[in-house]
Amino acid sequence: MPLPDFHVSEPFTLGIELEMQVVNPPGYDLSQDSSMLIDAVKNEITAGEVKHDITESMLELATDVCRDINQAAGQFSAMQKVVLQAAADHHLEICGGGTHPFQKWQRQEVCDNERYQRTLENFGYLIQQATVFGQHVHVGCASGDDAIYLLHGLSRFVPHFIALSAASPVYAGNGYAFCLLTTEYFFRLSR
């Protein structure tokens, strides 16, 4: 599989994506309502984007390309307010982090999106099991070489990043010997 072209950006700008759980109180099981929430907020989001992730129980909040962390935080704050109100209006709640502790992966509906449907065709039920919730930070670089240099400098902090993300010791109602179950999914999806 060929690598995508590198997209040049202004150095040290950033974009942040945050994957959120859509849950249905009072039991707080995952709800398959992200499409409905996206439709409810699409005209109220003025900066950033609220969009699908792999399954209908996932909602992704993504900033625009921001000049600094303060701009990104402002966009997240505004999106959060709109999304939380829409969720409350539909008797839903939003939460995040790692995995949902008692989800049934068999109930996860993959979004009707060309990319995710193609992923479902390639990986089958494994993609339904990959209903995991994380955060991605994209940092602008002037060239591919600069990006490699930056990654090399950050590589010594990988154990720290993994430790910070250790938020998923329970899955499908079972405790495991993993503090970070999310990486186990992606090992199974690698080819």
Image (cartoon, rainbow, N blue to C red):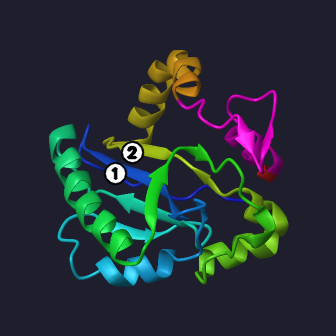
Which disc number belongs to residue 8? 1
Give me the residue at 45% from left, 83% from top: 36
Q: Is residue 79 left or right of residue 177?
A: left
Q: Is residue 113 left or right of residue 60?
A: right
Tag 1: residue type?
Answer: Val
At label 2, counting other C-alpha atoms closer than 10 Å, the crowd grade (few under 14, some 14-19, many 20 or more) is few
Give me the residue at 83% from left, 69% from top: 124
Q: Is residue 99 above or below residue 30?
A: above
Q: Is residue 177 left or right of residue 39?
A: right
- Sequence-first disc among 1 and 2: 1
Tag 2: residue type?
Answer: His
Give me the residue at 71% from left, 70% from top: 108
Of marks 1 and 2, the one in the foreground: 2
**Which residue does the numbered mark 2 point to in the structure image?**
138
Q: Give percent across and percent down for residue 119.
A: 71, 70
Q: Is residue 101 above or below residue 35?
A: above
Per the image, label 2 sits on a secondary structure element best described as strand
Is 178 in front, or is 136?
178
Q: Quadrant of residue 42?
A: bottom left
Q: Quadrant of residue 12?
A: top left
Asked if the magenta segment contains residue 181, the reply would be: yes
Q: Give percent across and percent down for residue 185.
A: 75, 47
Residue furthest toward the front? Answer: 26
The N terminus lies in quadrant? bottom right
Write the start and end of the magenta stretch as one range: 165-188
